[in-house]
Image: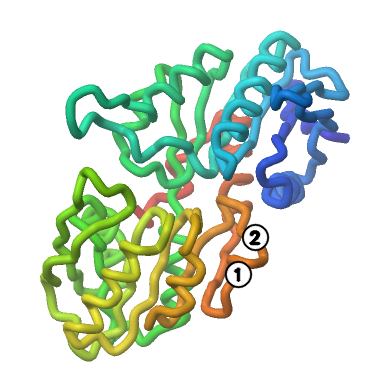
Amino acid sequence: MSGIRSTSEKTLKLFAGRAHPELAEEVAEHLGIELVPTSAYDFANGEIFVRFEESARGSDAFVLQSHAAPINHSIMEQLIMVDALKRASAKRITVVLPFYGYARQDKKHRGREPISARLVADLFETAGADRLMAVDLHTAQIQGFFNGPVDHLFAMPLLATYVRGRVDLSRLTIVSPDAGRVRVAERWTDMLGSPLAIIHKRRDPDVPNEAKVTEVVGDVRGRTCVLVDDMIDTGGTIVKAADALFDNGAAEVIVTATHGVFSGPAADRLKNSRITEVVVTNTLPIAEDKRIDKLTVLSIAPLVARAIREVFDDGSVTSLFDGNT
């Protein structure tokens, strides 16, 4: 059986693209169902073909695809899946995005720039999506880019619970790597009862993925510092932030992030840094050559499965985070 029926005869069906099959299988296992069998392949010119091997008519369809590299391929495949489900008469289509592609392009910094995060939302709406579900969007405003319901899931309780069991809380300081992450860092301090420090930095708009750290605001001397961010891409910014903490007397630095993008030199930078441990979730697949010894990967699958169950049962996704955010 690849679907769940409730007392009202609704049917939950979970569909997954090819970007992160391990996560999809784990979510299905937590739901107690099987993924809908799907044929998907690329034509010689790179175009994508998708066909579902069983009926989706009248189903509550959840389409899971993390926007992993190659990111444009992952997004296009998911759009095609949504279109196929719309044409197959699915009753409701929920797009499940463990990692939302183009989320960093959420506003215009200068003239003649796109707002690509809005474009992605528009594309899914045009394809036929009724609802979006995403984990730790880069900014909360992205929820307003989609005209239907958006379920915003938070990995902070999962990451913070791990940190709680890993460190001496009396010596812990939570650190925001920039002003934009302060609100998230404050949720960490509320949950763990720890002081907050902030790294003030200036980013050069002409040089992507690079930032200049200027100063540390807060007491970090002799402390175990936990840097909290939504993603680690090339690793340059987070390593510079850790260096700034050590330069200000930090005893140990642990880095946590929801999304382990790990582009280009990220693994080597983190491996060769003074960072003690890097903790991420499995919203994105992490290749074996990126799995350095100091890396810990926590599974987001139980949270995604619970959220899917709440949506299917017309429950409250917000209730999953009551008291934690």
Dot 2: element: loop
Q: Of the numbered discs in the image, which one, if any, rests on residue 291?
A: 1
| Near-viewer residue (47 or 52) | 47
Does 234 appear above or below 196? above
Q: Position of residue 174 (x, y in %)?
A: 27, 71
| Near-viewer residue (104 or 272) | 272
Q: Position of residue 138 (x, y in %)?
A: 36, 44
Marks 2 and 1 sit apart, C-alpha to C-alpha, by 7 Å
Badge 1 density bin: few <14, some 14–19, many ≥20, Cα 10 Å: some
Q: Position of residue 136 (x, y in %)?
A: 42, 46
Does 27 appear above or below 274? above
Check if mark 2's residue and mark 1's residue have beta carbons within 8 Å.
yes
Q: Which kind of residue does numbered mark 1 sit on?
A: Arg
What residue is rendered at 48% in x and 54% in y? 259
Dot 1: element: loop
Badge 2 density bin: few <14, some 14–19, many ≥20, Cα 10 Å: few
Does 267 appear above or below 146? below
What residue is rendered at 50% in x and 29% in y? 132
Q: Of the numbered discs in the image, which one, if any, rests on residue 43?
A: none
Viewer can see residue 8: no
- Side (left or right) of 245 relative to 93: left
Viewer can see residue 272: yes
Q: Of the numbered discs in the image, which one, if any, rests on residue 287?
A: 2
What residue is rendered at 40% in x and 79% in y? 273
- Please state the total of marks drawn on the protein image: 2
Q: Which kind of residue does numbered mark 2 sit on?
A: Ala
